[in-house]
Image (cartoon, rainbow, N blue to C red):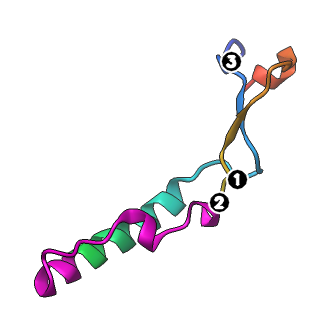
Amino acid sequence: MSRSRIKTAVFGYTTATSDKIGKQQANRRYRRRVNQTLQNQPELLPQLRELTCVWDMPKDGKGFWKEAHEEAFRK
């Protein structure tokens, strides 16, 4: 994989490698609440943003690094 490179200069703001675990937990929490609500009050479904906060995820988003050096594109 010596020629393996990242194509764009987009990097996460923290050292966390992925948001996968946070997204899984948020969606499980949402699906559980929807199933409970459907049994009691089917006309009042919750929104995903009511149950989760994007600031609680492992990564704080992504940013574009305009002047990235060649070393930054190596995997």
Left or right: residue 33 compared with residue 65: left
Location of residue 2 with respect to 45 vertically, above or below = above
Q: Amino acid at mark 2?
A: Pro
* Distance Cα–Cα, label 2 vs label 3: 24 Å
* Distance Cα–Cα, label 1 vs label 3: 20 Å
Residues under numbered marks 1 and 3 in contact, where contact means CB atoms less than 8 Å apart = no
**Residue at (20, 76) in percent of width and height:** 35
Quarter occupied by residue 36: bottom left
Helix, strand or loop at label 3? It is loop
Q: Quadrant of the N terminus?
A: top right
Q: Is residue 73 magenta?
A: no
Q: Amino acid at mark 3?
A: Arg
Q: Residue 70 at what x, y percent from top left?
A: 84, 15
Sequence-wise first label, 1 or 2: 1
Crowding near the residue tagged with mark 2, few <14, some 14–19, many ≥20 C-alpha atoms within 10 Å: some
Left or right: residue 71 compared with residue 20: right
The residue carrying mark 3 is: 5
Q: Which mark is residue 16?
A: 1
**Residue at (47, 58) in percent of width and height:** 23
Residues under numbered marks 1 and 2 in contact, where contact means CB atoms less than 8 Å apart = yes
Quarter occupied by residue 43: bottom left
**Residue at (44, 73) in percent of width and height:** 51
Extreme-front residue of the structure: 43
Along the viewing direction, whichever of 41 and 75 lies nearer the viewer = 41
Sequence-wise first label, 2 or 3: 3
